[in-house]
Image: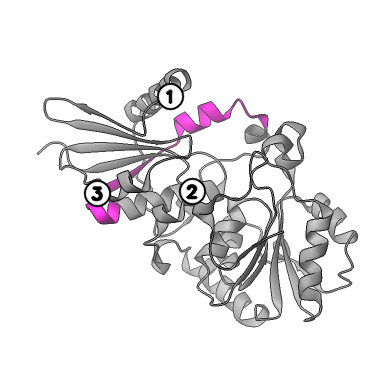
Amino acid sequence: MIFKKKIYVSIVGGLGNQIFMWLNAKNFSKNNNSKIFFETLSGYIFGLKYSYNRKFKRYTKLNQFKNIKNNKSNYLISLIFIIIRIVNLFFKLKKILSINLIFLRITVFNDLNQNFSNFQYKNYKQKENELIFFIGYWQKLFFIKNFRDNWIFLDNKSENKIKNFADKKINNKTVALHIRGNERLWQKQKKNHPIPNLEFYKKTINYFKKEKVKFHIFTDDKNYSTEIINSLDLKKNFIYIDKYFKKDFEQFILMTKYRRFILSNSTFSLLPSIISKHKRKIIFVPNLWFNKKRLPKDLMVESLRII
């Protein structure tokens, strides 16, 4: 047969968003024995309307992970995704939309509004001659529930570097503290992504202080994080992770090695805290997550504590 099971995933956003999209596609692919292809052009074009995407060079980074095959789609697939995005702007596409051709079935799985049904997803079986176009964010635990440790890892050099650091410096007395700045400080972004206030950091840090812990600072904005740290009484009980790991995809994997977390409202730190295999984790997240709303129930785990 000319056409075989394939999944095309439109990649957009920062690394946390991209990993969510990948894990969702991997989960679906595993259940349906289909091949995954990445599409990046349509997300890039539609992302140009946000100037921070240009300024902070938010581009696809999945190819940095050793086991994620970089199967790229062609321009025809990108054109289809562009059409899907344009049509959705005006008519709000259904969550599942299928078109049957003579020898081919094309199906769109649409989670642009982040409301895709678990039931529809769970019970869908891809046909042999079906091409599925995944578009959206797929930020639900259900979509990545079959996650396995070997689904995301880096090259041997990076993995060994992370392991050595974790063995020497990460223990029950260390806390991963994520402070996100950059585009989140822009006035337009603050409306949708309200940054945690200083009181959030004070309360969560005070929780751990009595145990004399050391805080490991993960940040994409050294100047802003320095302002926060200087306002807190941490003395010398902290280190900046970028001193040891400059690359964000290495920091992402490193963060999965911790048991205690203080998170910004960002999937870059939320997803590693969820993936972390430690038992009795403690994860603090800010009260407001996105668009003045709390973290969705679909992303709640037992160890989460909302401040």
Q: Is residue 85 magenta?
A: no
User: N-terminal of the two: label 3 or label 1?
Assistant: 3
Specify the amino acid type for callout 2: Gln
Identified at 53% across, 77% down, the residue is 279
Q: CA distance from mark 3 to mark 1?
A: 27 Å
Specify the amino acid type for callout 1: Lys
| Residue pointed to by mark 1 | 92
Helix, strand or loop under label 1: loop
Q: Quadrant of the N terminus?
A: top left
Decide which of 67, 234 is in the foreground and name it.
234
Rate crowding at label 2 as few (under 14), some (14 to 19) or many (20 or more) other CA atoms within 10 Å.
many
Helix, strand or loop under label 2: loop
Rate crowding at label 1 as few (under 14), some (14 to 19) or many (20 or more) other CA atoms within 10 Å.
some
Q: Give residue 107's position: percent from left, percent from top.
A: 27, 33
In magenta, the rendered stretch is 29-51
| Residue pointed to by mark 2 | 139
Q: CA distance from mark 3 to mark 2?
A: 21 Å
Residue 214 to residue 226: above or below: below
Q: Give residue 261's position: percent from left, percent from top.
A: 66, 66
| Residue pointed to by mark 3 | 34
Decide which of 169, 171 is in the foreground and name it.
171
User: N-terminal of the two: label 1 or label 2?
Assistant: 1
User: N-terminal of the two: label 3 or label 2?
Assistant: 3
